[in-house]
Amino acid sequence: MTPVVRARGVRKSYGDTEVLSGIDLDVEPGAVACIIGPSGSGKSTFLRCVNHLEKIDAGRLEVDGRLVGYREHGGRLYELREREVAAQRRDIGMVFQRFNLFPHMTALENIMEAPCRVRREPKAVVRERALALLDRVGLGTRGDAYPAQLSGGQQQRVAIARALAMEPKLMLFDEPTSALDPELVGEVLDVMRDLATSGMTMLVVTHEIGFAREVGDSLVFLDGGTVVESGAPREVLADPSHERTRAFLSKVL
Amino acid sequence: MSEPIRAVPVRHYGRLVFLVALVAFLALAVWAFAGADIDYSVTLHFLTADTVLSGLGNTIVISVLAQALGIALGVVFAILGRSRYAEIRAFSAGYVWLFRGTPVIVQLLLWYNLSLVIDTVTLPGLGSWQTNELITPFVAALLGLGINEGAYMAEIVRAGIDSVDKGQTEAAQALGMSRLLTLRRVVLPQAMRVIVPPTGNEFVGMLKTSSLAYAIQYGELLQSAVKIYSNNLMIVELLLTVSIWYVVLTTVATVLQRFLERRYSKGVQR
C-alpha cells in the first residue's frame, strides 16, 4: 500500500541555518505517527512542509503518492500553480498550536466556510455535517459561539472539526495542546484519540509523551533536523537506543 | 464602628486657572462676534435657500462618490502592493507616491484642464469625444478627489491587512482557500476593525476637502455661499451658513463611523 506520507531526504534551510537535514519518514494509511523532539529540532517545520506552507529545498515529499507542490514530467520538476497547491491542501487537514480560528465567524461558520466556499457544496448539506462534527467533538450546543467566547480547549476542538469538515485523507497536528491550560489538554487529546480510533491517518507533533505511547503507531524522535530514532512508541520510549533520545526523554517524562 | 474618613480633597488649582482662561477667551470671542456687524438672521435665513440646499446636496454626492472611489482604489492598490511580483508592487507604490505627493487642489485643476493635454478621447469602434465635453466639473471633481483619496486609503488598507495575524492566512491556506478567497473572507473582514476608524476620519476630511472643487466650478456648498454673497455682500453671514451645514454633515458622519466600528468589532469584544 502507498504510504499517505512519504518523505525521503527532505531538506530545508532558512538562510544559512539548515532546519531539516534529510528527513526520511513514512506514514501508512490509518496510522498515527507522532513526532517528538526538543524545540528547534525542525518538527513543526517538517509538518508545515507536508502541506506546502513551507517549501522544501531538497529531497522528495509525497502525500498519497503525489509530489507536494510540484509536478514531475520527463524527469523535471515543475512548480504547481497556486490553484493546484490549494487543491492539494484540500485533502490535508491541519490543526495549529494557536488554533487560528476565524474570530469574526461563529464556531459553526468556521466549520462551514471551506466546504461552502472551496468545495462549493450546498449549504444545507454542509450545515448537517458541521453540526454532526460539533457533536462529535462534544460541542453540539456551542455552534453559535464566537471563538472568543470559547475556552482554549473548546477552540481547539472546533479547529479539529473545521479541518475534518473538508473530509481530509490526512490530518496534521502542530503541537495542538501546547497553548492550552493543563486542565484543558485532556479534552483535546480525547478528541484526537477518538479520531485515531476511527481510522484517520494522523501526523502529530507533540510534547504529550503519554498520548504518543497510547495512541501512536510509530514514534519519531527528531533532533537537529534529523531523525535520530524511530519505531514503535512503547519500544522507543521504554528503551531508547540513542543517548540524545534518552537525554530528551529524561527531561520531559 | 470605625470613623468615616472626612479628608480635605486635593485642590486642583491648575484646573481652575484653565477654566477661568477658557471662559474669558470664549467671552471675548462671543463679544467680538456679537459686536461685529453681522446679521445672524441672514445666516439662518439662507440655511434653507434653494442654492444652499442644492450645494449641500452636491457636497454630499461628491463626497460619498469620491470616498467610494477612494476606498475601491485603496483596496485594489493595497492588494497590488502585496503582490508576489515586484513590478506590480512598484506600480502600487508609485501611485501612492505621486498622488500623495501633490496638492489635491493642483490635481483638481489638472483634471479640469485635461483637454490641454489630451484634446479628444477615442475608443476604437465606439466613437470619439472632445475631452472638454467629457470632463465636466463633476467628473473632474470626482476623479481629482477620488484618485487622491485612493492613495491615502491604500495606506490605511495596507495597515489593516498587516494587522491581521499570519496564522489566519495559514489556516485559510491549509483549508485549500485561494489567495483571493482568503483575502475576501478571512483577512479583509478582520482588517476592517483597523480600517474603519481612519476611513471615517478620511470621510470627515473629504466632506470639507470637497469644498476645493469650488475652484473648478463644481456647485458644492461653498460655491453656493460665494454665489450668494457676491450678490448681497453678506460674506460672513453666508460663510457661517455653510459652516453650520459642514458641522451637521461631519457630526452625522461621526455617528455613522461609530456605528460601523461597532459592527466590525464582531467576535472581538464579546
Image (spheres, coloured by chain):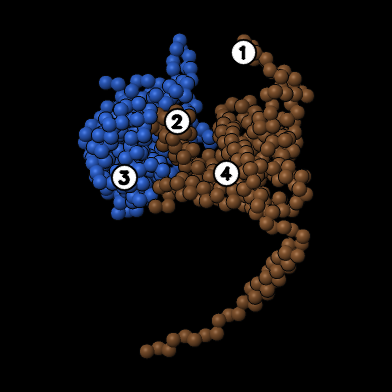
Secondary structure, mark 3, is: loop
Give the spatial CA distance, label 3 vs label 1: 54 Å
Amino acid under disc 4: Thr
The residue labelled by disc 2 is B181
Residue name at image x 62 percent, y 13 percent: B126
Q: Which residue is mark 4?
A: B199
Q: Which one is in front in this view, the residue at disc 1 or the one at disc 4? A: 1
In the image, taking residue A57 as reference, residue B33 lies left or right, namely right
Nearer to us of marks 3 and 1 is: 1
The colour with which the image depicts chain B is brown
The tint chain A carries is blue
Q: Are marks 2 and 1 in contact (CB under 8 Å)?
A: no
Cα distance between the residues tagged 2 and 1: 35 Å
Q: Chain of mark 4?
A: B
Tell whether label 2 touches label 4 (CB within 8 Å): no
> On the rendered image, what quadrant is the N terminus of chain A found in?
top left
| Callouts 4 and 3 close, C-beta under 8 Å | no
* Nearer-N-terminus badge (4/2): 2
